[in-house]
Amino acid sequence: MSAPRWLAIVGAGTVGAAVLVIGLLHVVPPSSAISPYRRTISEYALTEVGVLFNVGVLMLAAGSVATMLAVVGAGLVPRRSAGVAALLTWSVALAVVVYFPKHNWAVGPSFEGTVHRYAGVVAFLSLPIGALLIGRASWSHPRWRGYARWIWGLGLWSSLCFTPIVAAIVAQRWTGVPWWQAIPLGAVERALTLSEVGIVLALAWWAARAAAEDPPVVAQGGAAPAGEAPGMR
């Protein structure tokens, strides 16, 4: 088994395990008392089983890095590209979210809470952008256009999942209702998270299929074998 395919399998498995860990927090006490409709996922970090949340998020970050390496190794995107940078930004932002835990804003602002909030925004935005860029780069590739358009579509869906938050922030000026109360923030954030997990799993599947090709079918702009230019096949 090639290294990129192995990385893709490890990445998908790690992300799947992360989803299982964080999913259990929704049904196992005491974290099950948190409303998934109104309360953000990060609030699990403030419970007695908060370590499980942190482990789950770090597993998601690690699985995303493995998937990124698989995508690059399979020749789907150049390692020096905006799409890869977006995937790396997503993973780093997840680690920052764990290092700077969620803050109770009812007691006033804090540096840690501010960093946590902005890191979450960066994470939620960077992965959809990466998916859109990676999908668009191979939009017309004769072998990979189906995968590329699926990745692009997931990126668009994930971007749309973020729009209720943007709309609530903009509307706050006229309604006076705090943006985090104007929408079911927990539900919106969970839908957004699921869409982004879907992006990583889809990228892992694409990388595994590409790495299994013999000879490899290089995506447009990808890393061609030595002596070949991308797009020659």
Image (cartoon, rainbow, N blue to C red):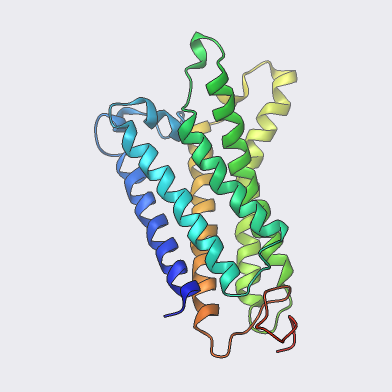
Q: Is residue 158 visible?
A: no
Instruction: Give 6 or 146, whichever is nearer the viewer.
Output: 6
Quarter occupied by the C terminus? bottom right
Q: Residue furthest front?
A: 226
Q: Quadrant of residue 37?
A: top left
Answer above or below: position of 206 versus 180: below
Q: Quadrant of residue 45?
A: top left
Instruction: Give 225 or 18, whichever is nearer the viewer.
Output: 225
- Residue at 26% x, 29% y is 30
Q: Residue furthest top?
A: 107
Q: Residue furthest left?
A: 29
Instruction: Give 178 or 132, whichever is nearer the viewer.
Output: 132
Answer above or below: position of 221 versus 200: below
Instruction: Give 158 or 43, whichever is nearer the viewer.
Output: 43
Query: Could you tell whether 100 is left or right of 159 in the image?
Result: left
Whole-percent x, y for residue 147 in the image: 60, 73
Whole-percent x, y for residue 212 in the image: 49, 83
Query: Could you tell whether 8 is left or right of 71 in the image?
Result: left
- Residue at 53% x, 22% y is 112
Q: Is residue 106 visible?
A: yes
What count of labels does the image hold? 0
Quarter occupied by the N terminus? bottom left
Q: Quadrant of residue 227?
A: bottom right
Whole-percent x, y for residue 167 in the image: 69, 33
- Residue at 58% x, 27% y is 115
- Residue at 75% x, 83% y is 229
